[in-house]
Structures are given as C-alpha cells and as structure tokens.
Image: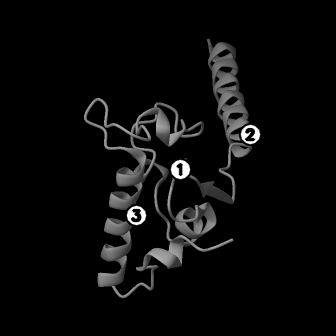
Amino acid sequence: MGKMLLFLICCLLFSVCLFQYVMADKKPPEQISLTLEGAKLPPVNFSHITHVEKAKLECVLCHHKDKNPQEPEACVKCHPLKEPQNNAPVAKDAFHKQCITCHNESASKGVATPAKCNECHKKQ
C-alpha cells in the first residue's frame, strides 16, 4: 500500500509540473493591434505588459466569456463588427465601454491613463 501511495503522489507531482511547463509557454503577446474594419480612427496598440503585468489586471476582465483564458477567442467572435447579436454589443461599442470605464475608474484613483481619443488611437 505504501509503494502505491508513493507512486500516486509522484504521478500527481509530475502532472502538476508538466501542466506548469506547458502553460508557461502560453503568455499573451506583448502588444496587439485592435483594428476594426472601416474604422474612422487609427487602430489601438494594446499593451498586455501595461495592463496585465504593470496594472495587475486579470485576463478575464476583457476575455470574460472565454472557456480557456490561455487561448482566447477573437473579440469579433462574440462582438460582431456591424449588428449586435445575442445581446452582445458590436466590437467598437464593447471596446469603448470596457476601456473607457476602466480608464475612468483608474483616473478617479489618481492613476494616469489615456482619456482622449488620440491618446489610444495614435496615428501611425
């Protein structure tokens, strides 16, 4: 019985270590370009480093419906470009609501965040 228990504990530890090793490679890209077809303003260069590492925001704040947060779906899968579907706002409205709400909350706490359109939508 003792050898079996020791074997099971070793298997469990190996599984945990293997899981951590596999997941360590699943870091988000440092920066992504939030581009919407037909947009009047330039795309937003979104920094995961600024939001996740420096501001300590959780991935689920933006990736709120993803089944696997390590492999997020494209935003437009739930937030279409033109017409709202399934009670989900269009991508532009979803981005603006999420970003502006969070930036305003941060600013009210004294954290400097972009507040004007051209501070996020920078010309290339």
Of pointers 3 and 2, the one earlier in the residue sequence = 2
| Label 3 residue SS | helix
Q: In the image, what residue type sits under mark 1?
A: Leu
Where residue 36 is drawn, which disc sits there?
1
Q: In the image, what residue type sits under mark 2?
A: Tyr
Q: Could you tell me how far apart the alpha carbons at marks 1 and 3 are, in whole angstroms?
A: 15 Å
Residue at 47% in and 33% down: 77
Query: Would residue 41 appear left or right of 33 to someone viewing this image?
Result: left
Query: Residue 92 at x, y = what percent?
Result: 41, 52
Q: In the image, what residue type sits under mark 3?
A: Cys
Query: Would residue 83 appear left or right of 19 to someone viewing this image?
Result: left
Q: Which one is in front, 19 or 3?
A: 19
Q: What residue is pinned by disc 2?
A: 21
Quarter holding the C terminus is bottom right
Q: Quadrant of residue 10?
A: top right
Q: Quadrant of residue 32?
A: bottom right
Query: Residue 62 at x, y = what percent?
Result: 43, 51
Residue 93 vertical position relative to residue 103 in the rendered view, above or below: above
Q: Residues within 10 Å of mark 3 (few under 14, many from 20)?
A: some
- Image depth: mark 1 or mark 3 in front: 1
Q: Could you tell me how far apart the alpha carbons at marks 1 and 2 are, in whole angstroms?
A: 35 Å
Residue 96 vertical position relative to residue 112 in the rendered view, above or below: above
Of all residues shown, which one is farthest toward the left?
A: 87
Q: Could you tell me how far apart the alpha carbons at marks 3 and 2 are, in whole angstroms?
A: 32 Å
Of pointers 1 and 3, the one earlier in the residue sequence = 1
Where residue 99 is drawn, which disc sits there?
3
| Label 1 residue SS | loop
Q: Which one is in front, 14 or 82?
A: 82
| Label 2 residue SS | helix
Residue at 59% in and 39% down: 70
- Image depth: mark 1 or mark 2 in front: 1
Query: Residue 58 at x, y = what percent?
Result: 46, 55
